[in-house]
Amino acid sequence: MIELKGKNIIITGASGGIGNSIIEKLNQAGANILASGTRIEKLNELKEKFQHIKILKFDISQSHKIEEFIENATKELGGSLDCIINNAGVTQDNLAIRMSLEEWQKVININLTSTFLMSKFAIKKMLKNKSGRIVNITSVVGHTGNLGQANYTASKAGIIAMSKSLAQEYAKKNININCISPGFIKTAMTEKLEDKFKEAIISKIPSARLGDPDDIANAVLFLCSKQSSYINGETLHVNGGLYMA
């Protein structure tokens, strides 16, 4: 069993289905968790469910406040930071010729720029510990592309390349930076899909099913642990075989 007892971990986008599962796995492993998101009512629900975690409302689109957020979150955790999981992100889909500059910039700024800044200021804290882990949640469509998602796919592909660069910069400082690339996962969003669309998706997946949030959470748990100490700058694909790198 993987143990993270005493490890201080921040997770953004904590209130969604995948975020919930990640917190549950980290909590079971004994980690000290700070959960962040934009919906305080959802964060309070998490606090009721996992009483030992800390919560901090924050919108990662506020890029000018990210350094302050990392500072406050680290203080809440006791003054040090071992791992950050950049799980928050947005979509704003449109066909390319209809996509406004605002739609493009919003998704790029939140998904890519804010993830860079969260990583940057987390690294500054980790350098003091002489160790750390960063796990960036990307997407299978960052590898394959997807209709109507030029902004989203560009942001997720950018996270992958950025993570490789950061991994090269800080590997000698014992800071490992990796990505997890989920395929189609059972969430509130996929549950709203019509059956015919869901069946069309599943028909393309060799495992013949949608993934569970726990499938992503298990991968996060591994990359936060000492068991992954020789894995750096990599992307772990969790997609049932939909995309084979």
Image (cartoon, rainbow, N blue to C red):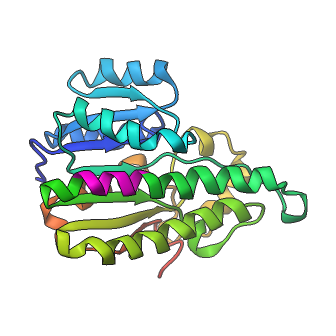
Which span is picked out in magenta? 118-125
How many numbered discs?
Answer: 0
Judge whether residue 49 is colored magenta.
no
By secondary structure, the bulk of the magenta-drawn segment is best described as helix
Where residue 6 appears, x then y in whole percent?
9, 41
Q: Residue furthest right?
A: 97
Can the viewer see residue 14? yes
Q: Quadrant of residue 120?
A: bottom left
Where residue 58 appears, x then y in whole percent?
47, 32
Q: Nearer the viewer, residue 21 or 232?
A: 232
Residue 103 in the figure: left or right of residue 6: right
Q: Residue at x 13, y 39 (%)?
A: 30
Where residue 87 appears, x then y in whole percent?
44, 49
Can the viewer see residue 217? no
Where residue 215 appears, x then y in whole percent?
37, 54
Q: Nearer the viewer, residue 213 or 91?
A: 91
Residue 185 in the figure: left or right of residue 96: left
Q: Residue at x 39, y 20 (%)?
A: 45
